[in-house]
Amino acid sequence: MENIGNTTLLTILLVVELMGLLVLVIPGLPGLGIIWVCILIFAFIQGLNWPGSLLFALITILMLIGSLADNVLMGAGARKTGVSWLSIGAALVAGVIGSILFFPFGGPLFALATLFIIELVHQKDWRRAFISSRNLAAGCGWAVIARLIIGVIMISLWGIWVLIAYG
């Protein structure tokens, strides 16, 4: 009977982790956090031994890196055209507000529109403002790819942990 309970728990955790992976394609949603919380639940139930502690530490580091990758890659894309960090910060704040008000696509739209408007006012050239916004959008795309790769690695490391635990 215990085996059925373990299998059910592992199946539920895997399904929720895969849903977290799917959520990663929508900017602003905490897909990596969802995956990490599932693995944390497994850690509480399973307990932490040496391999489990090492794997959980690696998974946690990956989650933190993936969470930061969003902002870094978006900002790096816009910085290529000389956009100031202040403009990028304003775009990120607008993205958060847009995500709250008009989920799920308000965040990226607000961020891009804010950057375009600020750069249009600053540079007085709509073409350069458009290029800056386009580069921010490209950075968003690269961030999605990076988060997906990191999410797959996190789930794979958890799978290794499950195999070690239940062999």
Image (tube, grey):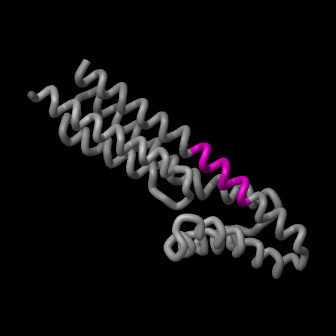
- In the rendered image, the residue lying farthest to the bottom is 121
Spot occupied by residue 43 in the image (x, y as percentages of width and height): 25, 39
Image position of 53 (left or right of 85)? left
Spot occupied by residue 16 in the image (x, y as percentages of width and height): 35, 45
What secondary structure characterizes most of the magenta part?
helix
Examine the structure image and report whether residue 53 is included in the region drawn in magenta: no
Above or below, 42 against 127 in this view is: above
Image position of 99 (left or right of 44)? right
Q: Which segment did they paint magenta?
A: 136-146
Image quarter of the N terminus: top left
Image position of 157 (left or right of 141)? left
Q: Foreground: 2 or 88? A: 2
Dividing the picture into quadrants, the one containing residue 106 is: bottom right
Dividing the picture into quadrants, the one containing residue 54 is: top left
Q: Residue at x 51, y 47 (%)?
A: 65
Spot occupied by residue 119 in the image (x, y as percentages of width and height): 80, 74
Q: Residue at x 54, y 53 (%)?
A: 68
Image position of 130 (left or right of 90)? right
Q: Foreground: 163 or 118? A: 163
Q: Foreground: 133 or 63? A: 133
Above or below, 144 against 150 in this view is: below
Spot occupied by residue 57 in the image (x, y as percentages of width and height): 36, 38
Q: Residue at x 75, y 60 (%)?
A: 79
Image quarter of the C terminus: top left
Q: Residue at x 15, y 26 (%)?
A: 3
